Image (spheres, rainbow, N blue to C red):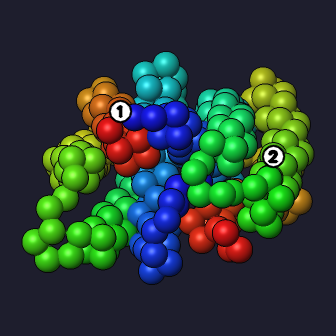
Amino acid sequence: MLAALRPDSFDLPLFLHVLGATLLFGSTATVAIAGYASRRTPDNSALLARVVAGTWVLVILPSFILMRAGAAWIVDKEFPGNASEPGWVGVGFIVSEPGALLLIAVGILAWVSVRKKRVLLAVPILASIYLLALAVAWFAMAGKP
Amino acid sequence: MDTYEWLLVFHVTGAFLMLGGGVVAATLNLTAARRNRRPSEVVLLFGLIRIAVVALTIGALLAFIFGLWLVHEAPFGYSYGDGWVIAAILLLILSVVMGSIGGRRDGETARFAKALAEQEDSPSEELLRRVRDPAALALSYGSGLLLIAILALMMWKPGA
């Protein structure tokens, strides 16, 4: 139900964008879940630190690239050249660009967590903030307020 | 925002919860399937997958209910008889059934791991064999692939 009277040529970039966004949501949720769980199970905190770092490298990073590349592709098709973009597109950029800095911070802290053999509390907190930002983005993309 | 857009927000939220929950479950399942995992680690990882199952269940309900409502509400002449709508419903049902059966087998593996952890918490070939059970993996990962196929159907809407 995501499509509504849009040219067929928009389908592939939109599919890649949404697929990347859902994978990014799931992988960020994995980091948040593993991070909070490590506070409750100190015996397994080294394992969960590796889960957090592995998820960041193998899923968060590629899915962010997929989401962002799909977004750039479809914006280029829908609003070519200097065409003005509606506010909901701006919300997407606000979430994805400062959000990238947040994800880089999560990645650095995940690496530190592996070295320390325990997940730093900042990791799940930052991941949770990013999850909320993603929810705002999909609200804006779907509802186009 | 009108009714259609609100329905779309809830439908998309369902899709994010389903696919996101699938990613959480797959990541933790792959981690559990590594050689030399202690039973207590498998218990922990499979226990965390239960959080993903809650997201998957809520997501499937949201996507299904609001998806059906959207077909009725959308101003584009969609019908419950459209091939892409029928295909999406059938694929969603198949995905839920496959995920449930795969999840039940994983539940049995988690109980076995818990029993092992209470005796001697050391890596077990039998536990590894159960965690890597090809039937359970095929059901669970097949269920996830069907969700991606449904996402593709929602984008291309063949025949609409």
Chain containing mark 1: A
- Residue A133 position within the rendered picture, expressed as x and y whole percent measured from the top left: 31, 37
Chain containing mark 2: B
Which residue in the rendered view is the most extreme toward the left?
A82
Q: Amino acid at mark 1?
A: Leu
- Residue B92 position within the rendered picture, expressed as x and y whole percent measured from the top left: 78, 52
* Gap between marks 1 and 2 measured at Cα: 26 Å
Q: Residues within 10 Å of mark 1 (few under 14, many from 20)?
A: few
Examine the rendered structure and indicate whether residue B136 appears above or below residue B11: below
| Front-most of residues A47 and B100 | B100
Question: Which element carries disc 1, helix, strand or loop?
Answer: helix
Label 2 sits on residue: B96
Q: From the viewer's perspective, is B119 left or right of A86?
A: right
Q: Quadrant of residue A57?
A: bottom left
- Residue B143 position within the rendered picture, expressed as x and y whole percent measured from the top left: 76, 56
Examine the rendered structure and indicate whether residue B111 appears above or below residue A7: above
Pointer 1 with pointer 2, Cβ within 8 A = no
Q: From the viewer's perspective, is B16 left or right of A74?
A: right
Label 1 sits on residue: A132
> Is any part of residue B40 visible from this angle?
no
Q: Amino acid at mark 2?
A: Val
